[in-house]
Image (spheres, rainbow, N blue to C red):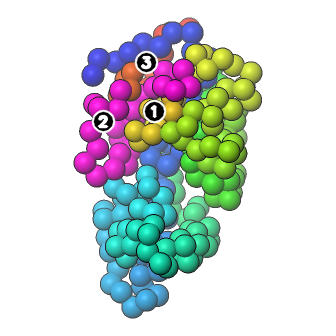
């Protein structure tokens, strides 16, 4: 895809897991710990990583072959949440280049923020534990508004909180629902191809305005100020 150049951008919004931070090691560890406590063998992180974008559902599918229709799914999901809550900052780190990207955005006088489907229960302690997020203008969690992505409302709420028009923002994410939400909100959209993507993802079919293979490449999409 030819890189688009976005003009008159005032803020860059990002998905969290798979876009700004690599949380797969902690999410995988929480699910794998559940296996170990049941006497099952550990699975390699590589098996969990492609399913991180699906959250608890994805982790339980890998760990136990369990879907949301399983009779014990809700019990297992809450157990997973409790274990993830206890380890969510142990191994999670920003992707390489994210710190430099944020610093460059700020240097250009641009604002930035987070719009994630991750519940506030996890988003708040995670972002507060990492200095990276001290300069974020807004952090919207999956339960901040009545709707989660791919509904546009979380992105619209982020723009409102920054007193910006949606068209003054672009949204970067590693899942098709991120692109769908951004387009519905009237924002420019960028597919983060270095993220989790999901098994068999066809990024070209998402309809993003641009694709990037590394965080710093986002800077190439912005018209110089």
> Between marks 2 and 3, how big is the CA–CA gap?
18 Å
Left or right of 159 in this view: 36: left
Q: Residues within 10 Å of mark 3 (few under 14, many from 20)?
A: some
- Residue corresponding to mark 3: 221
Circles 1 and 3, Cβ within 8 Å, touching? The answer is: no
Residue 120 x, y percent position in the rendering: 68, 53
Observer-side mark, 1 or 3, equals 1
Residue 185 within the magenta-colored segment of the rendering? yes
Q: Is residue 38 left or right of residue 9?
A: left
Q: Residues within 10 Å of mark 2 (few under 14, many from 20)?
A: some
Q: Secondary structure at mark 1?
A: helix
Separation (CA) of disc 1 from disc 3: 19 Å
Q: Which mark is residue 203?
A: 2
* Few, some or many residues within 10 Å of mark 1 (<14, 14–19, 20+): some
In percent of width and height, residue 117 lies at 56, 48
Q: Which residue sits at x=51%, y=33%?
A: 181
Q: Which residues are magenta?
A: 183-207
Secondary structure under tag 3 reads helix
Instruction: Name the outermost residue toward the bottom.
Output: 39
Residue 161 appears in the picture as rendered:
yes
Q: Earlier in the sequence, mark 1 or mark 2?
A: 1
Residue identified by numbered label 1: 180
Q: Given contact means CB atoms under 8 Å apart, are the residues at marks 2 and 3 in contact?
A: no
Q: Residue at x 57, y 63 (%)?
A: 88
| Above or below, 110 relative to 144 | above
Q: Nearer the viewer, mark 2 or mark 3?
A: 2
Which mark sits nearer the N-terminus, 1 or 3?
1
Residue 175 horizontal/vertical position (percent): 41, 41
| Residue under the image location 36 percent in, 86 percent down | 40
Name the quadrant of the C terminus.
top right
- Residue at the image point whose x is 30% and y is 62% from the top: 46
């Amino acid at each position: 895809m030819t890189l688009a150049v976005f003009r008159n951008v005032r803020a860059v919004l990002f998905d969290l897991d798979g876009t700004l931070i690599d949380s797969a090691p902690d999410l995988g560890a929480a699910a794998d710990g559940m296996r170990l406590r049941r006497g099952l063998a550990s699975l390699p992180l590589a098996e969990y990583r492609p399913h991180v974008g699906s959250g608890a559902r994805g982790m339980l599918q890998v760990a136990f072959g369990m879907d949301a229709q399983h009779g014990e799914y809700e019990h297992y999901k809450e157990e997973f949440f409790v274990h993830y809550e206890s380890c969510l900052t142990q191994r999670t780190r920003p992707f390489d280049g994210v710190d430099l990207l944020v610093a460059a955005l700020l240097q250009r006088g641009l604002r930035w923020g987070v719009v994630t489907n991750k519940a506030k229960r996890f988003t708040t302690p995670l972002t507060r534990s990492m200095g990276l997020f001290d300069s974020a203008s807004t952090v919207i969690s999956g339960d901040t508004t009545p709707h989660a992505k791919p509904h546009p409302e979380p992105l619209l709420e982020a723009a409102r909180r920054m007193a910006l028009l949606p068209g003054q923002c672009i949204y970067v994410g590693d899942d098709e629902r991120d692109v769908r939400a951004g387009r519905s909100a009237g924002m420019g959209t960028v597919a983060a191809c270095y993220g989790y993507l999901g098994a068999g993802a066809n990024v070209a079919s998402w309809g993003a305005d641009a694709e990037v293979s590394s965080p710093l490449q986002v800077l190439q999409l912005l018209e110089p100020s």
